[in-house]
Image: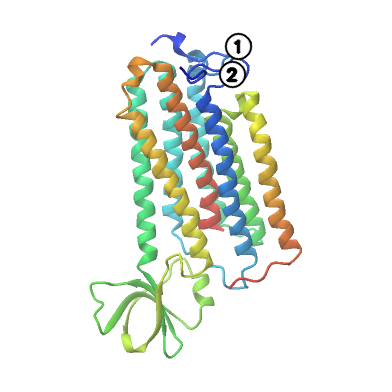
Amino acid sequence: MEIPYAVKPRPDTGLYNAKLGIWLFLASEVMLFGALFSSYILLRVNAAPGTWPHHWLNIWLGMTNTLVLILSSVTVVMAWASLKMGNFKRYKFCQAITLLCAVAFLCIKSYEYHDKFIHYEVVLTDGRIADGHLQSAETTSNTVVLEGIWATNHAELMDPPLHENKIKIEIPRNQIKSMDNYGPWHNTYTAIYFTLTGLHALHVIGGAIVIFAIWGPLAKVWEKDPERYTNRVEVSGLFWHFVDLVWIFLFPVLYLL
Amino acid sequence: MSDTHQSSVAGGVDHNSAEEVRKHVRTYVIIGAALMGGTVLTVWASLIDFGSREINIAIALLIASVKGFLVVGFFMHLISEKKMIYSILVFTVFFFTALMYLTLWSMERGNVIQIH
């Protein structure tokens, strides 16, 4: 038995099944990210004075990623428009750019994550704090080498100047009281940062896989049933635009404010 | 491919027809450029001291909201979407607003412990 309205829109609603389904799914996604944004607000507003960091992320990398996602949103909608106008070659070209944008976004995000995982805060036995990036090649079993700054307390690390002169710091291991990197466990800011951006990155990966599948292995559907194929591109595009929408709010909240 | 493959809507204008889509292509490019301009504007505004951090936050969120409207309205075609979609989104808006209201309400009451 054929499922009704799988391709043709239902006359009274004007919607085919998948379009109704994706909007219902996106409605639930709004609540998922809404809950995390709510958590972010509560964590930030109730943080003790001087404990919420600023300028911990590279604004220019964040801005580049925003521009990359916006470009991908344009190419997604142009790809759909190309199919509507019967231009399959242009659709293929536009979605290829979309996929390249997705890869570029994930590469930049991976670089940012790596930057946080090699960034260490080392508390010495005399109370001083060394903060900077681990120099793995120079670090030995006796000495930890960082490229960073000295601080006398945690508050100094919460809002470092944008252009700070970094120095090479060599610390004998027997003088280290504690040492941890800027991973999700570091403080509430890094916890919510990795949670929000990690969940978003999973959406980027999921969306890119679906777009790639439709663009590549499933492209032959276009020959047999162009309307079904166009519908699939539209539905995956709606999801991609939502991913872009979430990032439009994540960027200022995490990088700028 | 013939246009007969495209979706149609009984009793109304089909905003997804090939002819309608052709007219909108230019709009998509303009919206994309506006979104990129808005991103640069957001960064520029964040580097200016407007007197208090609250004002900076409000400006950044205002620009983000305008950009969000452009994405949802034009790229996701919500400004010309079917009534059924609006019916679904009314519930989303209601519950999202309630969630944010509860968040702000809990802060106003001061019944949240400080987090270190």
Q: Residue at x 28, y 72 (%)?
A: A135
Q: Is residue A210 above or below residue A45?
A: above
Q: Residue A63: where, in percent of width, then height?
A: 45, 50
Label 2 secondary element: loop
One can see residue A95 in this view: yes
Residue A57, position in %: x, y?
45, 60
Q: Residue A180 falls in which quadrant of the image?
A: bottom left
At horizontal 55% and vertical 43% (from top left) the residue drawn is A29
The disc at residue B10 is 1
Instruction: Say which chain tag 2 marks.
Output: A
Q: Which residue is mark 2?
A: A14
**Circles 2, 1 touching at the beta carbon (< 8 Å):** yes
Q: Chain of mark 1?
A: B
Work out whether A168 lies above or below A91: below
Counting labels gives: 2
Residue type at mark 1: give it: Ala
Residue B43 in sight:
no
Measure the alpha-carbon separation of dots 2 and 1: 7 Å
